[in-house]
């Protein structure tokens, strides 16, 4: 009798061992299937670099939210705070593609890997300024001064080739909501992108009266120029702010959006088509032309902007700023600078630079 019991126990143990082996082999198989997935397929005109988790992240791209952001050396803290706010407030898995210049890559890597951002999924892509040569400037020196990274958004499908839908964020934003909500912004059929309209009620409050026609096409394009007249666009059409973009990259590629943007960049360079009262970045006018009446809208609370246009006297109430899903300090007064509005909100997301190179300037600092 005891012998029988021992046999049964041995049989059960064998069965369990057998199941464990089968399961491990199955796991290995699925592991193998997933590893077939390429990041080897990077045929990009620049160096790409994957973070430690790069491989894993590629396996699950279906449930991931791709976000493109740029990182500029003299305001590297901005991208850091923006990414930190996104990842802290998001339940979904976010993968950042960070476009930067070669000279900044090491600084950025140190900042990411020595702080809690080491758990964030990201890859660093080096922007080649030569991409823009002949389009915005012939001289490499002035090219540098024109902030070449602001044009990275024109090349979204080049930098994020493997997905259909992606988000672009300016570095001077803070995200307070779950970015999944923004990602689910509905793009109408045939639309390659969604932007926030400059006439939406939420952000119109932030515009300073008398600061010019900054919320329509007239503020960005020179309607006296023949090339602009020929397009037949209405000058009083609301402009949009390209600091937050949701893009359908399939449509983007089908419509050759990148080539169209490059075309208008070059024509402006040759014929000076942009309004000379242009207050914001020169990346906006070509986007306004190419997407004229052909874009979807972003929920206004997902792009509350102009926090940087009026300094500390900004007219938003603290209550409104608290419930906004995304805050954008476009304008001259940056939250890492001396006189910005709501810099205390930005401070909550900023992570000090472990290399000690970057410091926010504070009113009471010196
Ligand atoms: C599973 O794969 C790993 C390498 O990926 C290998 O070391 C291990 O022996 C494999 N296990 C089995 C049970 O085949
Ligand atoms: C990029 O920077 C590294 C050092 O950080 C340097 O060795 C390399 O030559 C640079 N590459 C280019 C294309 O400038
Ligand atoms: C993107 O555009 C393509 C082509 O028009 C369309 O088939 C697809 O459903 C769109 N995807 C999303 C997420 O809007
Ligand atoms: C996009 O470019 C390709 C190749 O240059 C061309 O064949 C196609 O007609 C273009 N599509 C649109 C919508 O302009």
Image (tube, helix red, strand yellow):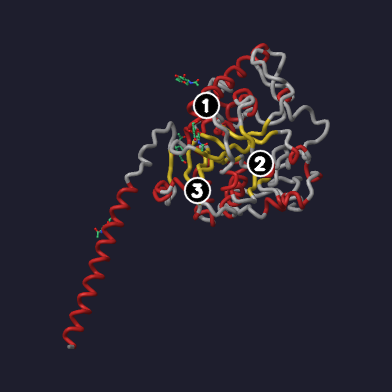
Task: Between residue 355 and residue 88, name the one nearer to us.
Answer: 88
Q: Which residue is mark 1?
A: 258
Task: Judge the density around disc 3: few (<14), some (14-19), many (≥20) Cα neighbours within 10 Å.
Answer: some
As drawn, 6 above or below 181: below
Q: Which residue is mark 3?
A: 109
Task: Between residue 254 and residue 35, name the one nearer to us.
Answer: 254
Task: Judge the density around disc 1: few (<14), some (14-19), many (≥20) Cα neighbours within 10 Å.
Answer: some
Taking the image as shown, residue 164 lies to the left or right of residue 235, namely left
Location of ligand 1 given as a quarter of the image: bottom left
C-alpha span from label 3 to label 2: 33 Å
Image quadrant in which you'd find residue 301: top right
Q: Quadrant of the N terminus?
A: bottom left
**Residue shown at 43%/31% (left/top)?**
45
Q: Which residue is mark 2?
A: 299
**Residue shown at 69%/34% (left/top)?**
197
As drawn, 249 above or below 63: above
Element type at marker 2? loop
- Where residue 79 sits in the image (x, y, percent)? 59, 45
Which one is in front in this view, the residue at disc 3 or the one at disc 2? Answer: 2
C-alpha span from label 2 to label 1: 25 Å
Do the CB atoms of the residues marked 2 and 1 lie less than 8 Å apart? no
As drawn, 30 above or below 242: below
**Residue shown at 79%/28% (left/top)?**
212
Element type at marker 3? helix
- Where residue 87 sits in the image (x, y, percent)? 56, 52
Task: Judge the density around disc 2: few (<14), some (14-19), many (≥20) Cα neighbours within 10 Å.
Answer: some
Element type at marker 1? helix
């Amino acid at each position: 009798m005891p012998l029988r019991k021992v046999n049964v126990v041995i049989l059960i143990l064998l069965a369990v061992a057998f199941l464990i082996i089968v399961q491990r082999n199955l796991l290995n198989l699925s592991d193998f299937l997933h590893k077939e997935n390429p990041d080897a397929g990077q045929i990009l005109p620049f160096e790409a670099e994957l973070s430690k988790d790069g491989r894993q992240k590629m396996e699950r791209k279906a449930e991931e939210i791709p976000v493109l952001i740029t990182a500029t050396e003299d305001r590297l803290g901005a991208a850091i705070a923006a990414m930190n706010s996104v990842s802290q407030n998001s339940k979904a898995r976010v993968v950042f593609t960070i476009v930067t210049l070669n000279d900044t890559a090491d600084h950025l890597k140190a900042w990411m890997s020595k702080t809690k951002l080491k758990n964030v999924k990201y890859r660093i892509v080096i922007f080649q300024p030569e991409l823009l040569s002949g389009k915005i400037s012939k001289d490499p020196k002035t090219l540098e001064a024109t902030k070449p990274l602001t044009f990275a958004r024109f090349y979204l499908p080049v930098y994020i080739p493997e997905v259909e839908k992606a988000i672009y964020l300016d570095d001077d934003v803070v995200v307070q909501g779950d970015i999944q909500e923004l990602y689910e912004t509905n793009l109408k059929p045939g639309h390659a992108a969604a932007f926030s309209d400059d006439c939406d009620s939420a952000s119109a409050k932030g515009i300073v009266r008398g600061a010019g026609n900054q919320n329509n096409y007239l503020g960005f394009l020179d309607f006296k120029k023949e090339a602009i007249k020929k397009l037949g666009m209405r000058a009083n059409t609301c402009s949009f702010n390209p600091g937050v973009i949701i893009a359908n990259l399939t449509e983007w590629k089908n419509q050759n959006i990148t080539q169209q943007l490059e075309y208008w960049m070059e024509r402006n360079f040759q014929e000076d088509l942009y309004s000379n009262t242009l207050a914001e970045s020169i990346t906006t006018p070509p986007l306004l032309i190419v997407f004229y009446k052909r874009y979807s809208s972003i929920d206004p609370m997902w792009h509350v902007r102009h926090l940087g246009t009026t300094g500390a006297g900004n007219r938003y109430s603290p209550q409104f700023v608290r419930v906004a899903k995304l805050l954008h300090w476009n304008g001259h007064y940056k939250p890492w600078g001396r006189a910005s509005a709501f810099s205390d909100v930005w401070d909550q997301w900023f992570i000090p630079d472990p290399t000690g190179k970057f410091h926010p300037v504070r009113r009471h600092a010196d």
